[in-house]
Amino acid sequence: MTYIQVRNEAAAAAAASDETFVRHVENIPYFPLLKVDPSNEQTVIKVAQIITSYNNDATTVNNTDIERDIQEAKVTVITGGLTNALFKVDLPCNNPTANNCNATPTFISVLVRIFGAEGLINRDEETTNFARLCNPKPNGGDKVINLVHSKLNLLGRFNNGRVETWIPNMRQAHYITDFIGSTEKHNDGALVMEVARQLARLHYGFDVKNVAIETSGDDNIEELRKQPTLWKVISSWIEELSQHLTTEKFQQHTNDDNTSIELFSFATTNSSQPAEVKDVAQHIISTLTNELAWLKERVDSHHPNAPIVFCHNDVNAANILLDTTSCDDDGRYDKDTVCIIDYEYGSINYAMYDIANFTCEHCGGNDNGIPNYELLPSDERLQKILVGYVNERNEIRGETTLSSSQKEEEIPNLKSQVKLFQMASNLYWGIWGCLQAADEVTDGTFQMDNDTMLRLEGKKDTTKWDNLRYGRNRLGRYYACKRSYLLNEK
């Protein structure tokens, strides 16, 4: 069954009052009528208990256990996520030998993820792909590639989120102390190299034939699996941004100094609007559309055979978990101690986009919206990353390690792709940030006052997250990279 089929069945069965209605998709329980309010801790505990209880029994939900566990459970808010609301839930464990049960008092810990970014992510595709990543099938034979951390698993999905395993003794990576390193033991790039290896395993271990795709009536699924989603996604975000910018509520949102549309023009084009521009919204959309077309043409003409695989698309420090007992103490980084999480933006894409995006994330900015581009990996570091990536890819393919000819021919080509896709990453996340801010204007949560421009320029409230400031900075980097790229072409 698919998620759509389950929702249709639930609606047809007039089961709207029964939140324990459940069916299986990808062998994972799905409760389409069970919804969680992130502001209500009790509903967070309840969904964790219902799904863990169902997994233990696999047939029914024990309401008596649910009521008891709600009283004894513990909830911890997990910070650092920009898209979802995340909670660690510790439930009393009726079976002390069960997975994830802690010491006395005995608890089982799970992660409850409540979906955000409504409309930006196809949650059916995303959850299907995540389930398949957690339970991979042999790829071209009997060999099964470990695509995700062995302890990372999907326990169940509900109406507006899902429940996953909680991996103990893990912390989020930091883009400075872990990517660059603050001690002699940790500054050799070992973590960065392990991430590159894991991306190679994801790219060449997960057969794209297993990737879930929303066909939208297109019967040629195999052809869709050869198409990178990068351009389609950015184009759809530009269209959605256009819809926001042209609403009356958006146009009328103002203070004494600026209107919302003027702020967004400054953020998206990185300049003040020309005096002759009459329709500012149209100017913004045409500018972004033209930039997208220019970048796509450059990729198509310069790298027509760029490898297309299943990509994560959002590997940043917050989406990398490190085993505190091994990474911090011993400096050991491998598939058991490093865990890449949050595959919600995962899709079929250019392989080097994942590498390029990861290098951009070395610059941070996910805390305050102000990346430090001086932290971008050097050409020497990028060369090392690509060599490690290709060696891992070759091993998965059953080929020899990187030969001298590959190093002389393939690596420069991949490096050239990375340079273009770094621009793509900045365009992608720049538009994403502006679109998130446009949502804030539409739903009335955008902070519009006499300090808004100062915040946008990074002159005020620089310790706080700001979607529009992040969008402006990523797009500003795109324009700067484009200028440099064009100068080097001459």
Image: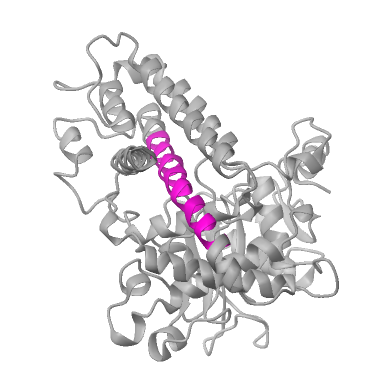
Give the percent coordinates (x, y) of residue 447.
26, 34
Q: Residue at x 80, y 75 (%)?
A: 143
Q: Is residue 255 above or below residue 201?
A: above
In the depicted structure, whether residue 350 falls above or below residue 230: below
Instruction: Check if residue 421 falls in the magenta segment.
Output: yes
Decide if residue 272 is on the left or right side of residue 34: left
Q: Could you tell me residue 98's position as x and y percent?
A: 67, 83
**Which range is magenta?**
410-436
Q: Main secondary structure of the magenta part?
A: helix
Q: Residue at x 57, y 37 (%)?
A: 301
Residue 431 position (above or below residue 420): above
Residue closer to the observer: 487 or 480: 487
Q: Nearer the viewer, residue 288 or 437?
A: 288
| Quarter residue 304 falls in | top right
Classify residue 43 by image quadrant: bottom right
Q: Is residue 127 magenta?
A: no
Image position of 383 (left or right of 376):
right
In this image, 474 relative to 4: left or right?
left
Q: Which residue appears at 36% of the width and 37% of the height?
A: 490
